[in-house]
Image (cartoon, rainbow, N blue to C red):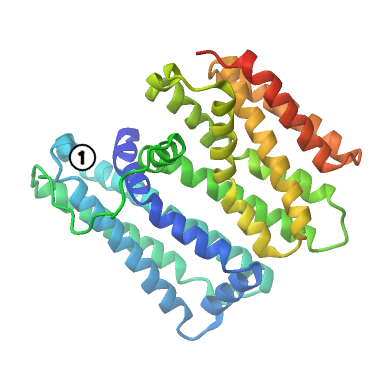
């Protein structure tokens, strides 16, 4: 079952990572919390609200079903057809779990609808989502059952591109690293950004409920930026395992650490845009928190070189490091001074921790 989920559901989110990033940009970059709440209330109260929601969910489900039917036609997925040996009840159960894996975004939104319905006492309009879930699971499960009952294998030939970019592929380590993240680690990238953006939105929403100083968003956004540590670890593995010859290139250490700062500065842009869009902080305050988050994340990334990627040893250090950072912030040390301390420490530690 785990193999089935990994080679099908994980592959779907990896190949559709770009689409989900666009959706995240739309949902968090252009819609505020009040607008999200207004949409939820519309679905729960309007006469055709749940019908519109069902149509949107059905379109997404058909996209998943089409992907499933096409994916299992590839030669490397011939082992899938051994599922016909499973007893029918077991096959139905496992295909149901497979469907739930595809429908994760809809389930998360359903949880949000339940929270809004409980808060605004609109439970009467909530009931249709449960038949929707049941129906959508049946659709994906039925497509999976149909595909293994009608095997069709093909070898995909190289297709001529209808459109070609008018420029050559960039000769840039930063570009190649980001390209690798999107193509090979799309699920990790999507999960890391979703968590960071949600935590950023929650922090600023709480910050707007009363009069607080900069310490509250400094602690919250520092943690939000640190939620990118999984993406940072993938970058470490990219350099240490995939792009090994890059370490032997005649590139100075200072240029290498400059690359590390640059790529992490790009990675944390989405949650920064969420903060700017929220409007709870001034531009200067947001700049301070951005520099702090960048410096902390780069320091955590460099620690991977010291421990040679051993997560068991790194996570404990990250925990105590964040506690220490929180204490520094609570003692009203200016954010820019803390960020400067982390930047200085990074430049001092890098020559000792980085091993060619």
Residue 63: tell me if it is visible.
yes
Q: From what the image shows, is residue 47 above or below residue 36? A: below
Total number of numbered labels?
A: 1
Residue at 64% from the left image edge and 42% from the top image edge:
225
Position of residue 197 measured from the top left corner of the image (x, y, whole percent): 60, 52
Position of residue 205 measured from the top left corner of the image (x, y, whole percent): 73, 60
Whether residue 142 sits left or right of residue 174 in the image: it is left
Dot 1, crowdedness within 10 Å: few (<14), some or many (≥20)? few
Foreground: 83 or 42? 42
**Screen quadrant of the N terminus:** top left
As drawn, the residue found furthest toward the right would be 331
Splitting the image into 4 quarters, where does residue 348 fall? top right
Q: From what the image shows, is residue 350 above or below residue 53? A: above
Splitting the image into 4 quarters, where does residue 131 fall? bottom left
As drawn, the residue found furthest toward the bottom would be 47
Foreground: 339 or 132? 339
Whether residue 144 sits left or right of residue 330 in the image: it is left
Residue at 9% from the left image edge and 50% from the top image edge:
150
Q: Which residue is mark 1?
A: 87
Position of residue 334 measured from the top left corner of the image (x, y, whole percent): 86, 42
Foreground: 348 or 292? 348
Position of residue 237 measured from the top left corner of the image (x, y, whole percent): 46, 25
Residue 85: tell me if it is visible.
no
Whether residue 139 sits left or right of residue 151 in the image: it is right
Query: Mark 1: which secondary structure?
Result: loop
Residue at 66% from the left image edge and 28% from the top image edge:
299
Q: From what the image shows, is residue 333 above or below residue 28? A: above
């Amino acid at each position: 079952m785990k193999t089935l989920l990994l080679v099908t559901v994980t592959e779907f989110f990896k190949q559709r990572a770009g689409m989900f990033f666009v959706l995240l940009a739309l949902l968090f970059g252009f819609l505020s919390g009040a607008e999200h709440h207004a949409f939820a209330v519309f679905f729960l109260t309007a006469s055709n609200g749940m019908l519109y929601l069902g149509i949107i969910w059905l379109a997404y489900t058909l996209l998943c079903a089409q992907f499933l039917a096409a994916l299992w036609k590839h030669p490397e997925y011939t082992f899938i057809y051994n599922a016909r040996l499973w007893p029918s009840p077991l096959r139905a159960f496992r295909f149901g779990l497979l469907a739930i894996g595809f429908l994760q975004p809809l389930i998360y939104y359903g949880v949000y609808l339940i929270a809004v319905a409980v808060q605004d006492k609109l439970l009467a309009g909530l009931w249709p989502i449960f038949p929707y879930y049941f129906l959508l699971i049946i659709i994906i499960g039925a497509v999976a059952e149909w595909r293994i009952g009608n095997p069709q294998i093909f070898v995909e030939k190289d297709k001529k591109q209808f459109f070609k970019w008018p420029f050559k592929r960039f000769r840039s380590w930063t570009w190649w690293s980001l390209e690798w993240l999107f193509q090979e680690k799309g699920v990790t990238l999507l999960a890391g950004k979703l968590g960071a953006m949600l935590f950023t939105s929650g922090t600023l929403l709480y910050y707007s409920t009363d009069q607080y100083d900069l310490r509250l968003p400094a602690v919250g956004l520092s943690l939000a930026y640190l939620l990118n540590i999984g993406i940072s670890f993938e970058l470490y593995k990219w350099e240490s395992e995939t792009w090994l010859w890059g370490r032997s290139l005649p590139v100075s250490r200072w240029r290498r650490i400059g690359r590390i700062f640059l790529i992490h500065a790009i990675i944390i842009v989405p949650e920064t845009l969420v903060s700017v869009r929220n409007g709870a902080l001034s531009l200067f305050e947001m700049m301070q928190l951005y520099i702090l988050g960048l410096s902390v994340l780069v320091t955590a990334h460099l620690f991977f070189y010291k421990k040679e990627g051993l997560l068991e040893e790194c996570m404990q250090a990250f925990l105590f490091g964040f506690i220490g950072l929180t204490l520094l912030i609570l003692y009203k040390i200016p954010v820019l001074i803390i960020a400067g301390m982390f930047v200085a420490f990074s430049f001092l530690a890098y020559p000792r921790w980085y091993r060619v």
